[in-house]
Image (tube, helix red, strand yellow):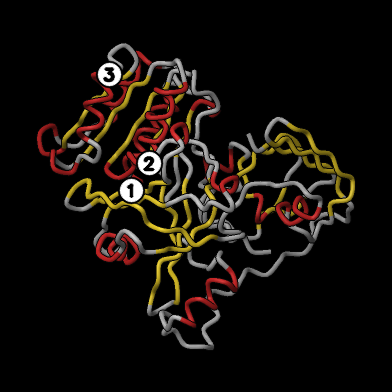
Amino acid sequence: MDIESFLLTVVDVVDETADARSVSFEVPADAPEKFVYKPGQFLTVAVPSDQTGIAARCYSLSSSPHDGGPLTVTVKRTAEGYASNWICENLEVGDTLRVLPPSGIFTPASLDADLLLFAGGSGVTPIMSITRTALEEGTGRIVLFYANRDERSVIFAEELTRLSAEHPDRLQVVHWLESVQGLPSPEQIKAFVEPYVDYDAFVCGPAPYMKMVTTVLRELEFPRQRRHQEKFVSLGGNPFGDIAELELAESEIAAAESDDEGPTADETPEPAVAGPVKLEVELDGEDHTFDDWDPKVKLLDFLESKGVKAPYSCREGECSACAIRLLEGEVQMVHNDVLDSEDLADGIRLGCQSLPATDTVRVTYS
């Protein structure tokens, strides 16, 4: 089953820095409910490619859902990033782009919580969405540590200054510039974090930066439920299905060879249990119980067959939009390109790739 996708019109383009631009899309009038989103979530977009037909990429929303404005993603060029360079060089007001509905789990459980936010470079994009929304709809205090190469690299510099002035009692922004202070060390991060050990932490940025910060948070005994890390993985498959493929062919964007069917899916392993399996799922505050989970059917597919709208994006194990946490039992994943050993040790699995490995499985999407 493919995700329903939508052709969105670009209504605004803003150059944030020399290497980053914000692109705003009009919410489709015939499906506004499909684009209700939470701060910190992302859009999956289909970028035209003359080599692969489309390049599916996930870009975080920097806009806030509280004001009902256009959906805005902020994209920074990377040296080898085809999609980011194409967006920064080609996309203009009036253009259209095929997009999947918002997804992702990098979002606060409560906007009233005190938030400790760490951003590095373009990792500020979902952090900005969280900050904007929490200031307008929440009551908690917000501390943002924002690391960049130099002053010219700071995305949203003026807005962060304005928000700090408008909310002096709630928002504190600390800029760290490598050109001035060098790279932050674990010791410096630890000293910064120690006054805020009761806050909910969110970390987004380059992999080494996120690893260092999350290591410090673990050392300071931040529990996993208060420690959140965004994942960046380039999608290898095409989650847009036949519609996107047809459009690309008709517009002659796709110069890819007709016999190129993309990456071959992993073969489904032999069932670990005879089944049927008892499944208990907590999703959006509701509990679902089933006694007939077929061991050969992935969790996401099974829930969809039961009419449960579980979150997902790529269906290929290449993003974390479908992440679940095991509460009881075990599953085996067919494919995993995004969860690391710490995630797995904490019981996190990908719903789109999970097959039951015990007779009873209990999971939560919260």
For marks 1 and 3, give the CA distance: 23 Å
The reply to whether the C-beta atoms of the residues labelled 3 and 2 are less than 8 Å apart is: no
The reply to whether the C-beta atoms of the residues labelled 2 and 1 are less than 8 Å apart is: yes
> 62 or 122: which is nearer to us?
62
Is 227 left or right of 327, judged from the image as shown? left
Residue drawn where x is 37% and y is 41% of the image: 62
Identified by mark 1, the residue type is Thr
Identified by mark 3, the residue type is Glu
> 135 or 31: which is nearer to us?
31
For marks 1 and 3, the one nearer the N-term is 1
For marks 3 and 2, give the CA distance: 19 Å
- What secondary structure is marked by label 2? loop
Which mark, residue 166?
A: 3
Which mark, residue 74?
A: 1
Q: Is residue 101 above or below residue 237?
A: above
Q: Looking at the rendering, which quadrant does residue 55 occupy?
A: bottom left
> 245 or 331: which is nearer to us?
245
x and y, in percent, of residue 328 in the image: 75, 36
Q: Which residue is mark 2?
A: 62
Q: Is residue 78 above or below residue 349?
A: below
x and y, in percent, of residue 15 in the image: 22, 50
Q: Quadrant of the N terminus?
A: bottom right
x and y, in percent, of residue 245 in the image: 53, 76
x and y, in percent, of residue 253 in the image: 41, 79
Q: Residues within 10 Å of mark 2 (few under 14, many from 20)?
A: many
